[in-house]
Amino acid sequence: MIIVKIGGNILDNPARLQAFLIDFAQLAGPKLLVHGGGKIASATGQRLGITPKMVEGRRITDAETLELVTMVYGGLVNKQVVAKLQALGCNAIGLTGADANIIPARKRPVKTIDYGFAGDVDGPESINAKALEALLEAGLTPVFAPLTHDTQGSMLNTNADTIASVLATALATAFTVQLVYCFEKKGVLQNAGDDNAVIPHINQDKYKALKEEGVVNAGMVPKLDNAFAALQQGVAQVLICEAESLPRIHTGHYSGTTLSLN
Amino acid sequence: MIIVKIGGNILDNPARLQAFLIDFAQLAGPKLLVHGGGKIASATGQRLGITPKMVEGRRITDAETLELVTMVYGGLVNKQVVAKLQALGCNAIGLTGADANIIPARKRPVKTIDYGFAGDVDGPESINAKALEALLEAGLTPVFAPLTHDTQGSMLNTNADTIASVLATALATAFTVQLVYCFEKKGVLQNAGDDNAVIPHINQDKYKALKEEGVVNAGMVPKLDNAFAALQQGVAQVLICEAESLPRIHTGHYSGTTLSLN
């Protein structure tokens, strides 16, 4: 099966989003979509008079920000994507990690920074894979918003890359899973200034070298760490590419970055 | 199985909502919850600068109001209810009618009034009951927001009473369905000024007489019409009561109104 994560840059652009959803709807076999947030949350927050809270450069999910992301990610973005996929013949079902208790999480412990209602997932073993498999077996395409819950009654804000990685790993026991991160670049770049300098393949040794050389920058490290963790735990393949590459991932003309252990 | 609809007056009161959810979580057997909106949508709309649109006294769902209710009903209210039910040991899954294409609807045709993005459901035969039954068989408790979709890519705003009635009817072929409308009064009242003057039982003949006498007022007519339509199409029983009566609906001490055909 294929698990695709799309970022805010696609969600923010109606034409790109529609083109992506047409490609996604046409993918054969069981599939699952994880979406991020995008600027709509900040824009809605601004209209509501909610100012983004930052501590030491990190975004904090305070109580009103949690309400904002629950509304915007779990409601507006998620249901608009579901309605559009339904119109394209893809039997989508919009979910958060609270629904069917698929992704129980923990409120991030306060150390030097109190991140507020940020949710950390223990790992793939805490995912309720059976519920997810029942939905897939019913022919449904789950669409996840980047939200989890603390199992004590509160929603939590969780990184979409992490959700994609942990779901891919949890499903790897039942399926051969391909995990695709669609983002704003064509792939992992050898040279940040050259959008066409895509590194076609990265294994663990090369990743170590790229980090030492400083080619892989701070923003990419969590994404690649997540990806290699997924590969180490049974995910068959991880691809990092732009959304427009999705129809070509099974052809020889794919232009993104393929990650593998060796 | 039991299908319960709760109105905005419960959603707007955190203590009443929590008490209701505790009672709902304890109901045995397959169950389903439909929730309305509540004042949170109007309050959020006001903060966003969205003014309620009324034409000839009827509420209109224009494009920005559709975004508002998709956020607030489909995101904030729905996911908060799901997270709270999960904490109470009820394996809830939050849905709209777009999810799994369970409730396809039509944008209401423009006659004298353009209601905007208001969704009408053709009838129980248009419900995707198989998808809903698959969720119930997986041990899940569906929680529906009052939203549907037009199958062409747009969400629609649909009355929660109608959703409860049409889902109950669609499930009546597979289950013996009891439909419970929890609202702000103790039941249908003989005398609007006396909150304790609950009419314990209404059949079709009595309903006709109550309408002629003017005992059943304008606000109750659509609710009761929905209820009798559900009974005519196979729903076993319809109860109208306050939320606090839920734990007693299977006892002799139930104080609401029971509807039946004869």
Image: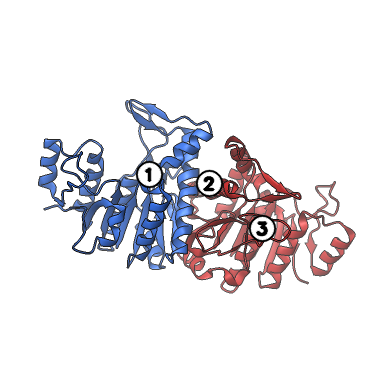
Chain colours: A red, B blue
Q: For mark 1, name the chain.
A: B
Q: Position of residue B196 (x, y in %)?
A: 20, 47
Residue A28 shown left or right of residue B186 in the figure: right
Q: For residue B138, say whether it is visible.
A: yes
Badge 3 amino acid? Asp
Q: Check if mark 3's residue and mark 1's residue have beta carbons within 8 Å.
A: no
Q: Quadrant of the C terminus of chain A?
A: bottom right
Q: For mark 2, name the chain.
A: A
Q: Residue at x 40, y 58 (%)?
A: B142
Mark 3 lies on a secondary structure that is helix
Q: Residue at x 82, y 55 (%)?
A: A217
Mark 1 lies on a secondary structure that is loop
Name above or below for residue B211 compared with residue A177.
Answer: above
Q: Position of residue A131 (x, y in %)?
A: 48, 67
Badge 1 amino acid? Ala
Q: Position of residue B117 (x, y in %)?
A: 42, 36
Mark 3, mark 1: which one is toward the viewer? Answer: 3
Tell me, for residue B105, which label it has, or none: 1
Asked if both marks, 3 and 1, belong to the same chain, the answer given is no
Asked whether A129 or B180 is in front, the reply is B180
Residue A206 shown left or right of residue A29 in the figure: right
Which residue does the numbered mark 2 point to in the structure image? Answer: A71
- Which residue ends up furthest to the right in the rendered image? A213
Mark 2, mark 1: which one is toward the viewer? Answer: 2
Mark 2–mark 3 Cα distance, whole angstroms, equals 20 Å
Which residue does the numbered mark 3 point to in the structure image? Answer: A161
Asked whether A162 or A233 is in front, the reply is A162
Q: Quadrant of the N terminus of chain A?
A: bottom right
Q: Position of residue B1 (x, y in %)?
A: 29, 63
Mark 3–mark 1 Cα distance, whole angstroms, equals 34 Å
Mark 2 lies on a secondary structure that is helix
